[in-house]
Every structure is written in structure tokens, then in C-alpha cells.
Image: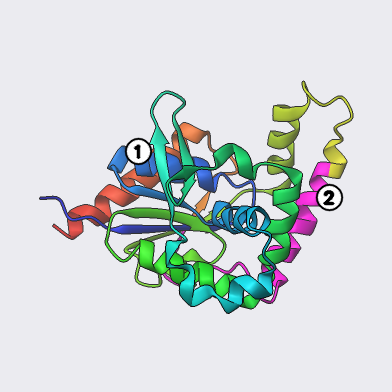
């Protein structure tokens, strides 16, 4: 039996963390966990049940029914998020949910709840989780930690190229400005700032294709796995 490990991926938004996490999870047959989507799930839960953050926090000990998991759709090659076995993937994509998720992510008690939930989900090996502080806070003992870096200008160009055909009002300069502002917030927010774990491997994909970064990361993962046989 091949020994399973836990893989934590951190980095700024737009570095391709989700793409890499999906590739590794599918390639290795591991669980996929999107930290950001979990905040959206809580936002959906609050709005659906007309709860305030305070009410949710007050009843956190009673929220054992709050179960989040990700399931792979082989047809669309995508991991969908489920809340208490309800498919909510398309229900958490609205601007209202995004704003609510952003607001609650700044709350220390909500953040602590999410971290504890992630720790429970990853208690058994065989997980790929990504976010801002996975390698330090959620999985400090992860066998493989990857810290992703991509030049802000490259990230802005990727976003611009992806969206320009459907958005004529798109501005590369505005995208770059937003990315730099988000990067600063990632590093300085008081609740869960982004920072590299000391034992994380840096993956600078600025000049890499998706396939190239995937091959590099999978080689790292297989190397670590083989060491634990």
C-alpha cells in the first residue's frame, strides 16, 4: 500500500493554486480542498438561514451539521463543493456571496471555525488544500508544502487575455492595480495573512505553462511519497 501524504499550497490570488491543486488531487487520487470556497459556503449558509455572524458564532458548537466536501465531476473535470450533501457550486458564485464571504473572512472567530474544520477534514492523509496560510496554520505537519509565486504583471496579463473577449471594458492597468492591492492585503490582513512556511518549496511559475508546473509539482509529490513507503 502506497503511503499517502498531505499537500499544502499557499500563494497570492491568481497564481494558479486551484489549477495545481486540482491536477495533484486527480493525479494522486487525493481529496481537494479549496479554502476560499469554504468561506463562500459559510456565506451561503448565513444568507440562506438569515443568520448574522454573531448568531453563527454563538452556535458554532452546535454546527456539527455544517459539513463541507468537494467532489470531482469527471464530465466537466471540476471539483464541486457540497454543503451537507447539497451541491452549492453554482449558488456561491454571485456577487452577494462573494461580498459576504469577504466580510466574514475578516472575522477572527469565523476564521478559527474554518481552520478547525479544515484540520478535521485533513486529519487523515491524502489531501491537497490551498489558500493563504495552509502550510503554517492548517497543516503545519504537511509532508509537502508549496509556496507559489507569479509575477503580478504576468497574472494581470493572464486575466486580461482570458476575459478580454467577453468584456470590452476590461483594462489591463486596472487589473494589475487590483492584483497589487490584493497582494498587499494578503500580506497585511490581521486575521490570516499570507506567509511562506519555512519548509515550503517555492514554485515560481512566472515563465511556466500549466503543464510544466504540474509536472514539477507532481515530481515533488511522488518523491516525498516514495520517501514515506
Tell me the CA gap for discs 2 and 1.
Answer: 34 Å
Report helix, strand or loop for mark 2.
Answer: helix
* Disc 2 residue crowd, few under 14, some 14–19, many 20+, Cα 10 Å: some
Q: State the residue at coordinates (59%, 78%).
A: 58
**Quadrant of residue 122 within the rendered picture:** bottom left
Circle 1 crowding by C-alpha within 10 Å: few under 14, some 14–19, many from 20: some
| Number of marks present in the image shown | 2
Q: Judge whether residue 192 can be spotted in this image.
A: no
| Residue 53: % across, % down | 67, 70
> Which residue is at the far front?
49
Residue sitting at 56 percent across and 51 percent down? 37
Q: Which residues are magenta?
A: 175-202
**Residue 139 picture location, percent across and down:** 40, 68
- Say which of 8 and 212 sits in front: 8
Residue 196 magenta = yes
Viewer-proximal residue among 62 and 152? 62
Q: Say which residue label 2 marks.
A: 177
Decide which of tag 2 and tag 1 comes sooner along the chain.
Answer: 1
| Magenta region includes residue 118 | no
- Write down the residue under mark 1: 26
The C terminus lies in quadrant: bottom left
Please identify the quarter of the rendering in which residue 199 is found.
bottom left
Q: Position of residue 5 (x, y in %)?
A: 27, 58
- Answer left or right for 111 relative to 219: right
Query: Who is closer to the viewer here, 53 or 48?
Result: 48
Q: Name which residue lies at 18% across and 60% down.
A: 228
Q: Is residue 143 left or right of residue 109?
A: left
Residue that sits furthest to the right in the current view: 169
Amino acid at each position: 500500500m502506497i503511503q499517502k501524504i498531505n499537500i499544502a499550497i499557499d500563494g497570492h490570488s491568481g497564481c494558479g493554486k486551484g489549477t495545481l491543486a486540482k491536477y495533484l488531487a486527480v493525479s494522486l487520487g487525493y481529496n481537494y480542498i479549496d479554502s476560499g470556497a469554504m468561506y463562500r459556503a459559510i456565506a451561503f449558509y448565513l444568507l440562506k438561514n438569515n443568520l448574522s455572524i454573531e448568531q453563527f458564532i454563538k452556535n458554532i458548537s452546535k454546527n456539527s451539521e455544517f459539513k463541507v466536501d468537494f467532489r470531482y465531476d469527471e464530465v466537466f473535470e471540476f471539483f464541486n463543493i457540497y454543503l451537507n450533501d447539497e451541491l452549492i457550486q453554482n449558488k456561491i458564485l454571485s456577487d452577494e456571496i462573494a461580498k459576504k464571504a469577504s466580510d466574514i473572512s475578516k472575522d477572527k472567530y469565523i476564521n478559527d471555525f474554518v481552520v478547525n474544520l479544515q484540520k478535521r477534514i485533513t486529519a487523515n492523509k491524502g489531501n491537497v488544500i490551498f489558500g493563504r496560510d495552509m502550510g503554517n496554520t492548517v497543516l503545519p505537519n504537511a509532508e509537502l508544502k508549496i509556496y507559489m509565486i507569479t509575477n503580478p504583471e504576468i497574472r494581470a496579463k493572464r486575466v486580461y487575455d482570458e476575459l478580454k473577449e467577453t468584456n470590452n471594458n476590461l483594462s489591463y492597468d486596472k487589473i494589475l492595480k487590483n492584483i497589487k492591492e490584493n497582494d498587499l492585503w494578503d500580506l497585511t490582513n490581521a486575521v490570516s495573512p499570507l506567509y511562506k512556511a519555512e519548509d515550503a518549496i517555492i514554485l515560481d511559475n512566472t515563465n511556466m505553462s500549466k503543464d510544466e508546473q504540474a509536472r514539477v509539482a507532481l515530481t515533488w509529490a511522488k518523491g516525498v511519497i516514495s520517501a514515506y513507503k
